[in-house]
Amino acid sequence: MISRRDFFAMLGGGIVVWMVDDADAQESGGGARRGMNQAMPEQVSAWLHIGEEGTVTAYTGKVEVGQNARTSLTQAVAEELRVPVASIRMIMGDTTLTPFDMGTFGSQTTPRMWPQMRKAAAAAREMLVDLAAQKWMVDRASIQVADGKVTAAGKSAGFGELTQGQKLTRTIPASEALTPAAQWKVAGTSVPKINGREMVTGAHKYAYDVKRPGMLYGKVLYPPQFGARLVSLDSSAAEQIPGVKVVRDTFQIGREGAGPDLVGVVAPDPQTADRALAALKAQWKPVTGATNSKDVYAHFKQTARGGAVESPGLVPYTVAYIAHTPLEPRAAVAEWDAGGKLTVWTGTQRPFGVKSELAQDLGIPEDHVQVLMPDTGSGYGGKHNGDAAVEAARLAKAVGKPVKRNWTREEELTWAYFRPGGLIEVAGKVTPDGTLTHWEFHNYNSGPSGLQTPYEVADKKEQVHQADSPLRQGSYRGLAGTANHFVRESYMDELAHSVKIDPLEFRLKNLKNERVRNVLMAAADKFGWKGRKKTAGHGFGLAAGMEKGGYIAAVAEVSVTAGAVKVLRVVQAFECGAVVNPEQLRNQVDGAVAMGLGGALFEQIEFADGKIQTNRLSRYRVPRFADMPVIETVLVDRKDLVSAGAGETPIMALAPAIGNAIFDATGQRLRSMPMAPKGLTGV
Amino acid sequence: MARITQLDVNGAKRRIDADADRTLLSVLRDDLDLTGTKYGCGEGQCAACTVLIDGQPTKSCLTKVGTVAGKRIVTIEGLAREAELHPVQQAFLDAEAMQCGWCTPGMILGAVGLLQRTPHPTDAEIVSGMNGHICRCGTYPRIVAAVREAAKKGGRA
């Protein structure tokens, strides 16, 4: 493992730009003051290096999990540095080589990291202009930077030539000026996925695929029930299997539902590890009286901190726990060196968080830990922590060799955390002319994201009530935005029908927010809402909302035949400021429809007696090809507005649009997500 | 236990030493380092582990290595010819038919098999032919478009 200091020394000549994530930071260092070296400042959020041979390398703690941040961040550098996309290398999520980053979540890469990358690149470009102005003794204004070259009055030089073997460093504050969106040449265009070729050839190495010399394979024994505690263990049969080592240890950071005991096996190949795990004879102290997936909503209300709110007229909605089910399960390879330093390759949205988790659990200094995050087989908010990493590190330490700890699908569907289930109770009042006058919204356990209604209403109360979750829960794409939008937009539909006003008209009547209005009208226009024609068994529904700087509207058409719900068509309009990459944005918005369909209609974690019953893909249904509607996406490109993230908000309006369409088709108001896990009855 | 000592993978005879009842998926990934073949569920539900056995798309997580000795195995690593991508690979790239890419190798091999059986599938045939494959990122419509385009250009066997 190399240190960060060694790393900067190794970079050699060229230009290094440090981007300081602090508007008050003093600009220092010398644009054109050659040879000026400075220590790396604190609070750096990104850095960029231009080598003497002209190679451009950018470094960010953000990671790539399929959302195409690698591509969009590369576009940021290409745009401001005026170099081809192909000439840029983007180093991501390596806790030694890249600056600290909280994590890749909350749709923050585009609003925060993307401008910082652009600023670092813009600063580097201006340094090159300074160097050329000095070298050629020409006015800065006469100098052009384009296609990786600096030119002026018949002179031309590559980036590397201008630095002449010296290392120039510069720290820039967050205020560096940027190219306006209307003048973008690379940003705002559909640059293809940067490493797409490695994906289609199978060349890309994910964390699950990492192999190290002498590596062994580890497995970990988990309890048969959430909360069950190990009473005794007979590992003699496992220990007799050639090559197997049984590891008994204690985690410093206990695992929710699984406790602090680590019982693991390590073997030369995965099958032997499986056999050894199966040969362990463990006795557990069982848990009794745990709530189940049917009673959990009452449980939320019973355990609400500060008590539940009882008020006449509140209508209950429920949202089930669901699983992210990233197709690449959690995985880690851990390797210790002779000096007690630890390197871990793992798929996570928070490499620096996992680094801290490892240091804390293993009781070693943080600078003894390096986490590397290969572009990962998706996360959707589900890979925030270091479960597999800590397991691999402890097993590797016990056996003195690198250990791979790849989770199985069953482990992923049982012991990873879930999107919270929730009970949401809502009430509203509307005048006969369709004016919303009262709004009350109580969310138990789902969470606050997307809680606030965008509609105008004078008398409003919106509350989140924390409650006891019987399952391990955490982030999920859009967080509670999906739950809160489902309830708000379904109930708005109920109110519209109660006064017999068209649901689109009713929304627009109570909506001043221009950006929500725009997407709602754009989606309705594209769908042909006004001219829609109802036929037997068909229905139409719409929904809208905003969250994380994104504005979304969805219109859905469904058919219900003999109880079977089929979503036929979904039109979504989405606006997130200036569009960074239209094709990749479309991919995200369309993908959100596909993924959201599962939670809307059939995905749910079923559990009882402390056991997850939906612990396999054969028991946990996720959307497939045959479930797909025709998906049409309208991108509202606002070049006058800053770019916001897009990975999450496009999932939020889908479920209520579908639910409202089912009501239109059948007269049944479905107030539980998933709405039709086994189809509908009575239609 | 019977042992398997040789596999025909991507046109080459590869030496191995594996129990016959191990999964082909594990032998490919762990013994031969052909990690383009992905694990997704271990029970044949997601088809991320699809490889071609004598031209047929086959779930390697459910296939014992002892049953495929002597058969022609093609993994994603063996699909391109030198620098030239297989038309289905190229079509996936052109259609941006991926996000995280984990399902992509299995999807591509499944599509290659589908186009061998049905060179000019309708969209409905693509959907039914590919329905055993899961893409959690939800790129299904793009994958259908990619298979459609690959069919138009004509595959190669």
Image (cartoon, rainbow, N blue to C red):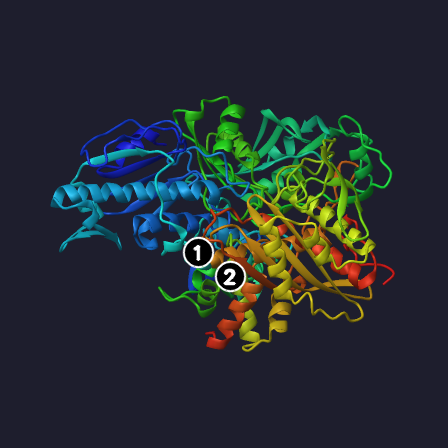
In this orientation, which residue lies closer to the viewer: A435 or A56?
A435
A581 to the left or right of A3:
right
Q: Position of residue A31 (x, y in %)?
A: 23, 36
Label 2 is placed on what type of residue? Answer: Ala
Is residue A583 visible to the viewer in this orientation of the structure? yes
Are labels 1 and 2 assigned to the same chain? Answer: no
Q: Quadrant of the C terminus of chain A?
A: bottom right
In the rendered structure, the residue with mark 2 lies on which chain?
Answer: B
Residue shown at 82% from the left, 66% from the top? A562
Q: Position of residue A37 (x, y in %)?
A: 23, 29
B59 to the left or right of A608:
left
Is residue B55 visible to the viewer in this orientation of the structure? no
Q: On residue A193, which mark appears?
A: 1
Q: Position of residue A65 (x, y in %)?
A: 50, 47
Against A88, is A38 above or below?
A: above
Q: On residue B47, which mark appears?
A: none
Against B78, is B101 above or below?
A: above
Against A371, is A559 above or below?
A: below
Pointer 2 residue? B97
In the rendered structure, the residue with mark 1 lies on which chain?
Answer: A
In this orientation, which residue lies closer to the viewer: B64 or A335?
A335
Q: Position of residue A153 (x, y in %)?
A: 14, 54
Secondary structure state at the residue bearing disc 1: loop
A84 to the left or right of A247:
left
Label 1, label 2: how far apart the Cα atoms are: 10 Å
Residue shown at 74% from the left, 31% from the top? A467
Q: Quadrant of the N terminus of chain A?
A: top left
In this orientation, which residue lies closer to the viewer: A122 or A296?
A122
Bin the neighbour count of mark 2 within 10 Å (Cα to Cα): few under 14, some 14-19, many 20 and up: many
In this orientation, which residue lies closer to the viewer: A109 or A238?
A109
Residue shown at 23% from the left, 32% from the top? A30
Quarter where residue A481 is shown: top right
